[in-house]
Amino acid sequence: MGGRYDYDESRIGVRPNRRGTRPRTKDRPAHKDAIIGMVTAVDRGRWTVLVDDHPVTAMRARELHRSPIVPGDRVGLVGDTSGTEGSLARIIRIEERDTFLRRTADDTDPVERVLVANADQLAIVTALADPEPRPRMVDRCLVAAYDAGMEPLLVLTKADLADPDEFMRTYAGLDVSYVVTEVRDDGTITGLDAVHERVHDRMTVLVGHSGVGKSTLVNALVPGTDRAVGHVNAVTGRGRHTSTSAIALPLPEGGWVIDTPGVRSFGLAHVDPASFIDHFPELAAGTEECPRGCTHDNEYCALDAWVAAGHAGDSGPARLESLRRLLRSRLGNPEDE
């Protein structure tokens, strides 16, 4: 009889290699029976998806990892798509996007954020006063719209406080549509019919600073929405964020509007600075005399002479300065806007 510490190799048990008993595959289910819906809202890891005119709550499938899923996205769903209380479907794929609007925290941040998908129009909402308009911010949004393949629309609010013609002179050289609105004492909005006409049967994203009247406009376009309305701080002259996340809302007469949270900045790190000049058509022709490799922000740039000769119109100097501010900010030399 062997001692306590005498071992026989034959008595040693070998644990089966369970990891190798079932070969793994990278092939994922095709989910050909997935139901297609449109994302309308995102809230704390849950997505609201419209399927056959009823909302479905969904989670993201593990294989999508951290892929951004945003309002406007068309997605494939499996699982419980009944929309009943407590039900939960699973988003297993994102359909190909027609367009997607992006921005970064600033012009040097390499991390871009997708805001909305599949919209064809970007409505840039800006107040003519209270708070004061910021043309440089409008220029940024215009560049982002053109880069995304979206048609821009300027929505000028609070026309009772300032003349819209003065603001629009800055953009006289651009073929950009605009509408003008103001809120009367009785709460009705003049110019609302013009806005309805522009957004009818389209998917329109609304962006703008806090306090410019964006939520007021959404509430008028989609009655019963009850988006929170902010106010402008009398000391800072800036609005307070009221919308906390983007949401897609169906228009009664057809189409969609996507309300986004108020923004203080609109970074363009994802846009090639060499393409900026393409979005200033009244200046672009003047670059033909620029030396090779011209950054359009140096003493050899031909744009100064082009603007001085009046080829870019009365708004030429302001537009050239706007272009150069964007370029300096994009290339890491930001200035107050």
Image (cartoon, rainbow, N blue to C red):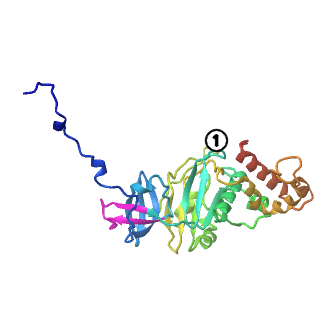
Q: Closer to the camera, 151 or 113?
A: 113
What kind of residue is marked 1?
Answer: Thr
Is 181 located above or below residue 23 in the figure?
below
Q: How many marks?
A: 1
The residue that appears at 78% across and 50% down in the rendered structure is: 324
Question: What residue range appears in magenta?
Answer: 74-92
Q: Closer to the camera, 230 or 290?
A: 290
Query: In the drawing, does residue 14 fall left or right of residue 49?
Result: left
Query: In the drawing, does residue 329 fall left or right of residue 230?
Result: right
The residue that appears at 85% across and 54% down in the rendered structure is: 292
Residue 176, image quadrant: bottom right
Question: Mark 1 = which residue?
Answer: 236
Quarter placement of the N terminus: top left
Regarding residue 215, the answer to whether it shows in the image is no
x, y percent for residue 280: 77, 60
Callout 1: SS: loop
The residue that appears at 63% across and 43% down in the rendered structure is: 234
Label 1 neighbourhood size at 10 Å, few (<14), some (14-19), many (20+)?
Answer: few
Regarding residue 171, the answer to whether it shows in the image is yes
x, y percent for residue 14: 22, 41
**As drawn, which residue projects farthest toward the left?**
1
> Is 3 in the magenta?
no
> Is 79 in the magenta?
yes
x, y percent for residue 127: 66, 55
x, y percent for residue 108: 66, 44
Query: In the drawing, does residue 215 fall left or right of residue 56?
Result: right
